[in-house]
Structures are given as C-alpha cells and as structure tokens.
Amino acid sequence: MADSKEKLFSDFTAPSRQEWRDKIEVDLKGADYQKKMVWRTNEGFSMEPFYLKEDVEKLATVNALPGEFPYVRGNKAASNEWHVRQDIKCTCAKEANKKALDILNRGVDSLGFSIPAEKVSKEYIADLLDGIYVECVELNFRTCQCHCVELAEILVAYLKEKGVDPQKVEGSISFDPLEKFVTKGKDVSGALANAKTLVEILAEYPRFYAIAVNAYKLTNAGAYSYQDLGYALSWGNEYLAELTEAGVDPCLAAKNIKFNLGINGVYFMEIAKLRAARMLWAQIVAQYTDCREAAKMHVCAYTTTYNQTIFDSYVNLLRSQTEAMSAALGGVDSMVVVPFDAPYEVPTDFAERIARNQQLLLKDECHFDRMVDVAGGSYFIEELTAALAGQAWKLFLETEEQGGFLAAVKAGNVQNIINQTNADRHAAAGKRREFLLGTNQFPNFTEVSEGKTPLACDCCCGQDSCEAGIPAIKTERLASDFESLRLTTEKAAKIPVAFMLTIGNLAMRQARAQFSCNFLAAAGYKVIDNLGFKTVEEGVDAALAANADIVVICSSDDEYAEYAIPAFQYLNGRALYVVAGAPACSEDLKAAGIENFINVRSNQLATLKEYNAKLGI
C-alpha cells in the first residue's frame, strides 16, 4: 500500500509558487493582483490567495496535537463536543424553572440563569433548580456583582444538601467587575477583593468557574477580532494577577477563569481567533504555573448582536449560523446562539427554538462535534491563526505597558479604541464598504417595520451613568443608522416614490436601475423599475403619472450627454432628479443645474438623509 501511494504522488509534480501566480495572472486578464486577490484584513495584515507547504512549515502550530499544550488545536483529543446553552432571564423562580425543564427536553444541556440581585436566596435557588439533575447539566449564573459571593455560598450549600458529586458539577458564576467598567463606566474595583473568596468557596468543584471574562461585550460593540482577543487576554491576565497576588495558588486561579467570547461574521478569522486564543492564553498561564491542565482556556461563545438587523430579520439566521459554525470548528466548550429577533423584541419561543436548532443542526446533521480541529493543517487557517495571534499579542503587550487591563480601562483607553472602531465601521457601512444584507445592500423593497422598533440596550451607551472621567463602550448595532432612517421614512405623510427612467443601452440601463433601486430602497422608498423608454419625455410623463418624488435617469455614460439634460429640463423641478453613475460629462451636467448623482462611490447614508431633507421628511 505504501508503495502504491509513493508511486501515485510521484506521478504529480507540485506547482511552484510562480506557476500558481502565473496562472492567477492569466485568469485576472490584466486586473491588479494586489487589489483583486490579496485580503487586507481589519486586523492590519494581509492574506495571500494561496499558501504552500513551505509557508507553514516554519509555524509551531502545525506540530501541535489536540488536547496538548498549548491547546491551539483544542482542549479535547477525542471529540469536538460542546454544550448547547440557552440563557434565561429569571423574575419568577418557578416560571424560570418550568422553562428550563422544557428546553432541557429540546436539546439544551447548558442553562444560563440571570437572577435579579434582590431574588438571591436559598428558597429562590431551590425553586429555580427543582427537578434539574445538576450532574447532567451545565449551570451558569449571573447576578449583581455584590451578590456573587452570597450566590456561591447558597449554591454550594444546595449541592451538598443534595449529595451531588463535586467532580460532576459543571458551570460558572459570572463574577466580572471589570465588565462594569467597560460597559457602564462604573468603578467597581472594590469588588475585586471578592474574587479570592469566590474561588475558595468553589474550590471543591473543579469544573465550576468562579471568574468570567465577558469579552463578548466588546464584540457586540463592533470590536475587530484582534481587539476582542487582545483585550480578552489582558482582561483574564488582570484577574489571574489579582488572584495570585491575593495568595491564591496560580494553578487554582487559572482553572477558575472562564472566557465568554463573542463571534463575529468573519468566518475564517473567527475560527483562527479561537485557535489563537487558546494558544496565547496557555502561554500566559505558563508564566504563572507549570500546571498544563490550568493552561486550558475554557470558552463559551456568543454569536454577536452587532450585525443583527430589524429589517429582513430572518437574514440574522444566516449571520448567526456562520458564526456558530466558526465557533464549533474553532473548538468551544459551550455556545449561545442569539435569537434572530433579539434586536426588536424579547425573543419569542419560536425564535429561541430556531436558535437551539441551529446548534443541533451542526451537531446531529453536520457532525461538527465529532472531529477535533478540522481546520488544523490548512495552510490558510494556520497562517491566519499565526497572523491574528501576532496582532492580538501586540495589543496585549500594549495594554500591559499601560499598567494592565484595569489601568487601561480606568484611563478610558480600551473604551475609546473600541468606540473609534465602532464609529469607523458605522462610517464604512454608510458608504457601503461594509455590507449588511437586507439593510444597505439588497433591501427588501416591500418590507415595512410592522411596529418593530429597536429595543433599548441593557448596557450604557452614553455617559449618563458613567463616573467622571470613565467612558463606556457604545453598542449601537451596525444597522442602527439605516434603520433609524427607514423608520423615519415610514412615519412620513407620504412614502417617497423613486422612479427609474431607463433609456438607451440595455445592459447599462438595467445595471444602473438595479443599483439605484437597491440604493434608494435602503431608505424605505418605494422604487419603480421599468423596461425602458424610447424618449426622455415619455419616461418623465410616466414618472409623473406614477406620482414619483424622485426620478432617476439610468443609461450609459456616453448617452448621458444626449439624454440627461433634456430629461432634467422637461421634468422642470416637478420631482427630485438624480443621475445614476459618474459619467465623464458630469461637469457639463452640473453646469446645467443637475445636482444629484448616485454611484458606487457615494456615501449612501449621507445621500439618503439629504434626499429625505429635500423631500421634507
């Protein structure tokens, strides 16, 4: 068998790098290789369209094995199993318990309970966990930071009363005072002293984590992959340093930290992020202790809310599904898929069911839980992992040079950087340099909000609740500007009608009409496309008959010199006149009084706001 394999491979000569490059150049037909083929990431590095074996032979990651330090290929060697988690907001303990028991029968094996501070009591926890076999279910709890110690004591007492084997208990308490700094601008550093107490209370339960790093909040604020990774590492290191300085054994301290990481829509980057995260965290822990088990990073992944939309909301399922795939292939311990309707309502039972099934589909039909690190050995993924790790590590070191994560947050450095990224991404979305399907690209022409409005976020987006000098991260979703514009249009006394005056070259008029319809429908305008008109007078008359508020002439660059000005003059101000494209004769058209042009270089958001203002909306 070995001989036949050797003979088989000897029959094929591996193409050289130059041969690959020459073939690509031929297929590009003169187009610029760097512009068309090289991926310039938001993380500050570039990725080539292909890699060869010799490119990755220099990387240490290719020699790593699943389940072995530094865990770049995952913590587990036998499978890629993860917990399907669903979070529950608890008001009434018995109602929350009823819901928990129901969803446990529907594929969930991890529960996240969010408990109001005033509800934390022995009786409440007993009612909440009634009928739940805690040895078989991962249990996660979130409450006010000041009540985490009390909650831990109650849980331990409950588990001992039930005679539960400590080795089989799995879960976490989301004790993360630094999250308050980041999301609300509140100095709660005094609560850090409770970290040691929490670890000691839960020391008997090796799979129950006392400390959380809720870095998914950064992802939901628009952070790039290297930013949420670099800051998550510094965040975790702050807790690790705090615990060890308080006298906690470094091995025990590291074992008690759980990372709740966000997953954004950049598919391959997020797979690489999770691989890089484990590798880098293992290296950090190794500086505190030689306990290899403690160097494992334990991750619960959250699909992001940042790219979710109100309009065409079922597209959110596509976004969260690719994010869930990234998380699964990247190797996580548990996962929360955010329901598709989360931006505008408390998720319905239907939406929560679909969110659960998205994970079950990956497990039961795609078998993502059976193979460990299927991306391992891919030249591209290995290179991406190394490149992303380098950028994240650079940010980690910069943060440490500022005195660590706590000092950087107190100074506002972390929040300011994330907020700038958020602002940059909103600006890019406004110019359609970052696409949101169904929002700024290919919107549903006939959709209306039907009463849907954005839910107020549950964290501080401004400065009202911030302490002096401490900013908070802003969490406006990427689609929020377009949604506000569209909702404003819906409230107008009359929905503007945009009429496509198509004339001349068939291919060009169709292409520009399609572009213009997508461009204008993003504001909620009613768009009317047409097959074409023989004369501009015929087109203008048809537009006025359709009660058009906007008339968009769609033709070829050459023909605009013939058609654009006569159409403008014949329309004579009876509707807003727009030229689709950036023809060479633009200056002549402007000299004739034509002001409005839309093309791929237009700032879509600013242009639509301007049109709304001109239309009196």
Image (cartoon, rainbow, N blue to C red):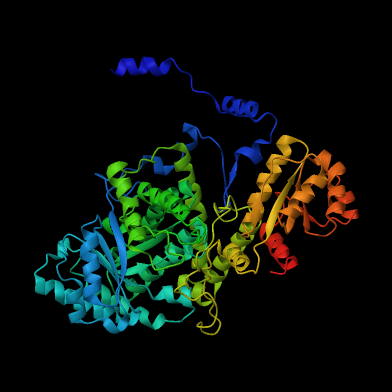
Horizontal relation, residue 511 to residue 395: left or right: right
Q: Which one is in front, 460 or 206?
A: 460
The location of residue 408, given as percent across then percent down, is: 51, 72
Q: Is residue 255 above or below residue 568?
A: below
Instruction: Kindly tell me whether residue 300 is visible in this rendering.
Output: no
The location of residue 387, given as percent across then percent down, is: 51, 48
Horizontal relation, residue 231 to residue 244: left or right: right
Location of the C terminus (image quadrant): bottom right
- The quadrant where residue 596 appears: bottom right
Instruction: Kindly tell me whether residue 456 is visible in this rendering.
Output: yes
Q: Which one is in front, 584 or 154?
A: 584
The location of residue 516, given as percent across then percent down, is: 68, 49
The location of residue 477, given as percent across then percent down, is: 52, 64
Q: Which one is in front, 368 or 287?
A: 368
- The quadrant where residue 33 appears: top right
Q: Who's the residue at 8% across and 69% down the image? A: 163
Count of numbered labels shown in the rendering? 0
